[in-house]
Amino acid sequence: MKNAIIILLAVLVGTCSRSPGTLEEVLESGELRIITRNDPTTYFRGADGFEGPEYLLVEGFAKYLGEKYDRKIQTTYTTKERFTEVLPALESGEAHIAAAGLTITDERQELVAFGPSYQDVKQHLIYRLNSGMPRSVADLRGKRLEIMAGSSYAQTLAKLQADHPDFAWSENPNAEISELLGAVQNKLIDYTVADTTAYAVHRYYMPDLRVARDLKTGDKLAWAFRKHGSDEIRAEADEYFAAIKQSGQLAQIKERYYGHTNHFDYVGTRTFIRHFDTRFENFRPMFESAGEATGIDWRILAAIGYQESHWNPDAVSPTGVRGLMMLTRTTARVMGVADREDPAESIPAGAEYFSQLKQRLKDIPEPDRTWFALAAYNVGYSHLKDARKITRMDDKNPNRWLDVKKSLPLLAQRQWYTQVPNGYARGWEPVRYVNNIRTYYEILNWLTLDEGYDEAPEENNLPPLQAAREESEQIPI
């Protein structure tokens, strides 16, 4: 009896003194704290506020928890300047989740607990075009290969040590992946290593970057949680990710940020950057003014103008469409344009026409609403309606670009265009049109330093990287 009482007291004391689990802490405080990184593949400030793949996933998770437990859950984000700071901050209790594009590794699993994987990536060895593609590990000898300190890339390179002991690489403790890719682009270093997602996004701003080889495949990205007390919140994350995979929401988030990156055009990207340097400044004030008048990001309008005419006010299509915004004669008349080749008339008219298309699509949430309006600008609103009808017929979502962009090319197939009111259309063209404009828009975000991402691949931003490189420890492998 005495022993039973002692055991009962021990259990009660242990129960009263235990620390609350992560989920319990979140629900009691009403706050979900996140550690992340400021990066185009994770979390950044866009034209309309914060966004990024990790941001949308976290916001969706907070909403899921709030609805399930009937609580209002507020998210708080803390960004770390360096990759090496993320996991220590999580372990110290600074946050409940690290959502920072983290790869699951055996070494990290000793420190933290991972949630479900939401994306597979590869590790690429990156070099610069025309610098000589390395065809074997032996070709890296004597070259400058730098990677992010604390990244999983270090573990991959270390595994090559046994067979190739006479070349060196370095972990740079003061550089993020954007800076290292910029250093390769600008010939400050020879090589770096980057994930599939980072390379896909940055090559549009740094078009000379190339993949030499895949160093590793099958890496999985996931959120990290504290090692202890996180079982319940990780179980909730399992349910959340299973739900968004099933609903297609996860695929939609990937489409939003990476859907346009599968269509890289080296020559087109270099030409765009050249035209930005030689033509764009003449028209930028007009695009900015049109953006203010319509409430549309001026970079989207500028990207439309480039796609239509390469910012050439005298452009004429084979069908007689004219001017910088390529207005048809009918559209110009409706919009009150007397001279389609006058950019002071065509830019605001094109912006207003695009704005009107967006208004007609107000039932569609952003950013898909913008992609739909772009498709309508190209192929016509009626054909877009037909594509949405085909999407419905196929039991897909007519308000989701990921689904409708698969239906648009069907407008060129007789079995489909005979079932819709407006008949045949070259439906593959608006898909390509939207992809191109999304690409130009991203490059404009990068090139307009005052409103784009914080780091840019320009040489005058990179001298600190050289200083940091001198401080990096050379690691022979």
Image (cartoon, rainbow, N blue to C red):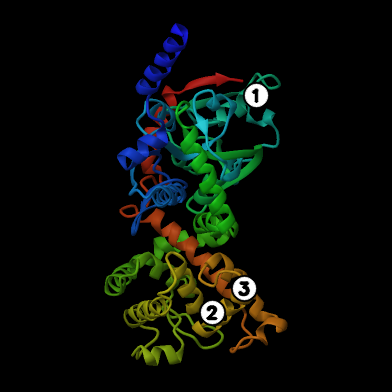
Of the 4 image quadrants, the one containing the C terminus is top right
Q: At label 1, which amino acid type do we have?
A: Lys
Q: From the image, tell me which residue sits under label 3.
A: 407
| Residue 138 lies in quadrant | top right
Q: At label 2, which amino acid type do we have?
A: Leu
Q: At label 3, which amino acid type do we have?
A: Ser
**Crowding at mark 2 (Cα within 10 Å: few <14, some 14-19, many 20+):** many
Q: First in sequence: mark 2 or mark 3?
A: 2
Number of the label disc, if any, that sits on residue 298? none
Q: Position of residue 159 (x, y in %)?
A: 65, 24
Query: For the residues marked 1 and 2, what is the alpha-carbon distance in whole angstroms?
Result: 52 Å
Q: From the image, tell me which residue sits under label 1.
A: 159
Query: For the residues marked 1 and 3, what is the alpha-carbon distance in whole angstroms?
Result: 46 Å
Query: Please, what secondary structure does the residue beneath circle 3 have?
Result: helix
Query: Please, what secondary structure does the residue beneath circle 2 have?
Result: helix
Relative to 257, does residue 113 appear above or below in the rendering?
Answer: above
Q: First in sequence: mark 1 or mark 2?
A: 1
Residue 416 or residue 412, whichever sits in front: 416
203 horizontally vs 122: left or right:
left
Q: From the image, tell me which residue sits under label 2.
A: 384
Q: Position of residue 276 (x, y in %)?
A: 41, 62
Residue at the image point whose x is 59% and y is 41% from the top: 131
Q: Position of residue 359 (x, y in %)?
A: 38, 78
Residue 70 or residue 38, whichever sits in front: 70
Task: Report the mark closest to the observer, 1 or 2.
Answer: 2
Query: Please, what secondary structure does the residue beneath circle 1 have?
Result: loop
Q: Position of residue 466 (x, y in %)?
A: 41, 31
